Each structure stands twice: as C-alpha cells, then as structure tokens.
Amino acid sequence: MIIIQQQPFDIGELHERVAGESTSLGAVVSFIGRVRDFNESPDVQALTLEHYPGMTEKALGSIVEQAQSRWRIERALVVHRIGYMVPGDNIVAVLTASSHRQDAFDACAFIMDYLKIRAPFWKKEHTASGAYWVRERGSDLASLSRWEQT
Amino acid sequence: MTLTHLNARGEASMVDVTDKSTTQREAVATGRIFMQPATLEQLVDGELPKGDVLATARIAGIQAAKRTHELIPLCHALMLSKVSVDFDIDRDTSSVGVRVMCRLAAQTGVEMEALTAASVACLTLYDMCKAVDRGMEIGEVRLERKSGGRSGEWQRRHEGEIHADTTADDDEILATPSKRHEAAPGSHQEAIEIRFFAELRERLGVAKLSVLPGQLSSPTLSALKMWVSERVSHPEALDQPRLLCAINHDMVQGDSALNAGDEVALFPPVTGG
C-alpha cells in the first residue's frame, strides 16, 4: 500500500497495519527516513517536500511490485510525507512483512533504494541564509548496482 | 539605453515629465506566496486567526498602489483611475498568486504602482498567515505587461500561453476572473499538458503549459521541448543534462513520440526519501 500525506505518521500504527492479527508473519522490517539538520548546509532549519501527484503513487506501486516479484513478502507499506518538515521529523516509512527476515530486509532496502531515484519527490532545504533545492547524490545511483540481477 | 533616473553626474534625479504626453496607461504585475498545504487549506476555509485574508490583502494592495510615491524615492505621485487585485489558489504548488492591474491617464507609467501593490499584497498575505506558518516564501514578483507612453506596449514573452496555464482547470479562482481565462483557444481534450516541478518550475516561472499537437514541428518530446524553450523567459533552465521526463506518469529516456491528450512532465533529478 502507498500513502502520501502531509501529517506525521505513527510507526506503531503502521506496524499494526502491516503485522495485524497475522500469526504467520515471522518478520516485519521497518525503515524510517528522517529530516537531518545537516545536509548540503550545516544548518538546515526546515525543508519542504514537493511531489508529482499521480506519478508518485504509480512509481512507488511499481517499485513495490518489483520487490514482491523478487522476494517472498506478504505485505509492504510505503508512507511518504510531503509539505513542511523540521529536523527530527519523520519523512518516509517503508515496512515489509514476510515469514522470514532475509526477504523482509532485502525487499525493504530495495524499495528504499529505488524510491530514492525513481519516485518524483523533491526537497527544498531552508537555512538561515536562504533556501535551495537539494541536488541528487551520486551514491544513491551507485547503490542500485547491488540489485542488478546477473 | 540610458537610465533616466540618473543625471549627467550619475546622481539620482526625478525625471521631468512636464512635456510628456498624457496617454492611457496600464500595467499588470504578479507575485506569488508559497506556503504549507495546511496553511493554504486554512486560508481557503477562512480559518486563520486574523480573519478574511484575501479581502485584507486586496485592500492592502490597493492602498499600496496609491502610496507608491511615498516608498519609491523617484516615483511620481499619480492619480490612479483603476486598481484591481485578484488572487488565484494553486494547490499543486501550494501557493497564492496575486495579480494587480493599475490604470490611469497620465504622463508617466504605472508599473511601479502595480509592482508595489503586488509586493504589499504578498506581504499582507504573509502577515495574515504567519501565526500558523513562518516558513512562507514570497517570489515571482514581476511585471507582466504595460501599455501606453513612449515605450508603447511591453509584454512578458508569450504571456498568453503562460497565463492560460497558471489558471488551469484545477485552480480555484477566488476573485474576478480576468480575461486570461479566454486565452487558451482550442479544445482541452486534444491538448498535450506539460508540467514542470521543483527547481525547474521556479526557474521557468511557470507550472503548466498546454499545447495542441499541431503546434509542434513533430509529435515528439524533442519538438515539445523546443516549443517550450521558445515560450519561457529562461529557456536555459531546460539545458541540463540530467533533466528527467515522464509521459503519462512513466519516466522515459531519450526522445519519445507524443499523442494528443498526453501529460508530459519535465523535472530535475528526484530527491525524496
């Protein structure tokens, strides 16, 4: 499931939603991305996150489908916030649930790595000396190579 | 081109307009304030603590136009015959746009009045909303067109297309609709919609454009980019090797064929997560 929202999320609730009443899910992996107070500047005060409604949901849905075709995951949930956030706020949560931990770990990392380069979100960081759009990171592109199938 | 506000010694001096002819003059200026989506919703719903935000900002803009000469040192005091201040709400960019038109018959132009009114209307929007959102940002304050006087008609390049699209269907018009609504000829079903995001949108100064396939030299992405570059004030913003493109919400690489009704998006590399 894909959720784009402005409001903060409660990771406990998300965990409940994924794990629920199930007694066969032996592993739930959750990743949370947060706003850092240092990034391209050492004094990030806030950021605003913009996205492309419609395409975001489609791109994330396709990434989750790819993960489901590669690993045995019963459930996957991606929640991404948009709008205004300050350091320490949660930005994104990816949860994967499986019978065994390795599938859940790998699928979660895969979804997050592809979200970074395929999902249409853009961050603008605000500092005391002004605001700027965050540039892409070469390391995000490089991290995809580990998922290339031979 | 000489700067008429400087005298022979390069000092500031007020231009003598006694001998200029009195003509009908008009100027349109716009500005935009970006805010959190939640703030925008509160503004639209009238839930902000200071009350009716848009009505207050409209009065502030009109007052500012009338008092421009008190703020801008070398600006003449004018008897304005008409000032209008309109707003549009754009949820896609989470912003409120301000559009000011000033008109009078006089010996000097009214673009400073229109620009001052647009700026002060934006500042008042900030003041009215700051209790809930201090991170708002004012931008895109600019002259859209002016007419009358020695320099005659001036218009921001291809204003028609740009305006037709800053007021696209999903924008809510809160005030007197202006004539820009009539600016998009042709039917919407056939048009290719073009959207810009993030830094590219800011640099181009436009969020959406639409084009009929017949207006392109060929039904391809490369022809569409060419068409866009001829219509925006900063086409160099499109000249970046990592510019990404999506057609109907799917990322594409290289040139691609386009069809009527397609939605094309151009944007910088993504930085979510």
Image (cartoon, coloured by chain):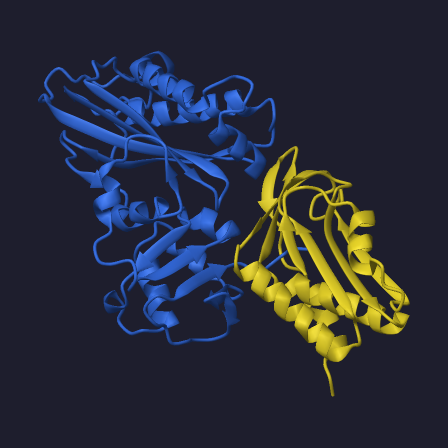
Chain colours: A yellow, B blue
On the image, the x and y values in percent for residue A72 come to 80, 76
Q: Quadrant of the N terminus of chain A?
A: bottom right
Q: Is residue B53 above or below residue B160?
A: above
Image-based side of A139 in relation to B152, left or right: right
Q: Is residue B271 visible?
A: yes
Image-based side of A27 in relation to B189, left or right: right
Please name whichever residue, A27 or B153, is drawn nearer the observer in this view of the structure. A27
Give the tally of numbered discs: 0
Q: Quadrant of the C terminus of chain A?
A: bottom right
On the image, the x and y values in percent for residue B268 come to 53, 58
Q: Is residue B68 above or below residue B247?
A: above
Figure quadrant of residue B114: top left
Q: Please give the name of the residue rendered at 46% of the width and 61% of the height, measured from the top-left corner.
A: B266
On the image, the x and y values in percent for residue B149 come to 14, 29
Please name whichever residue, B10 or B207, is drawn nearer the observer in this view of the structure. B207
Figure quadrant of residue B31: top left
On the image, the x and y values in percent for residue B181 come to 26, 43
Please name whichever residue, B223 or A73, is drawn nearer the observer in this view of the structure. A73
Please name whichever residue, B15 or B43, is drawn nearer the observer in this view of the structure. B43
Image-based side of A77 in relation to B40, left or right: right
Q: Is residue B154 above or below residue B108?
A: below
Q: Please give the name of the residue rendered at 74% of the width and 77% of the height, measured from the top-left corner.
A: A147
Image-based side of B164 in relation to A113, left or right: left
Single out the residue that lies furthest toward the bottom: A150
Q: Is residue A118 visible?
A: no
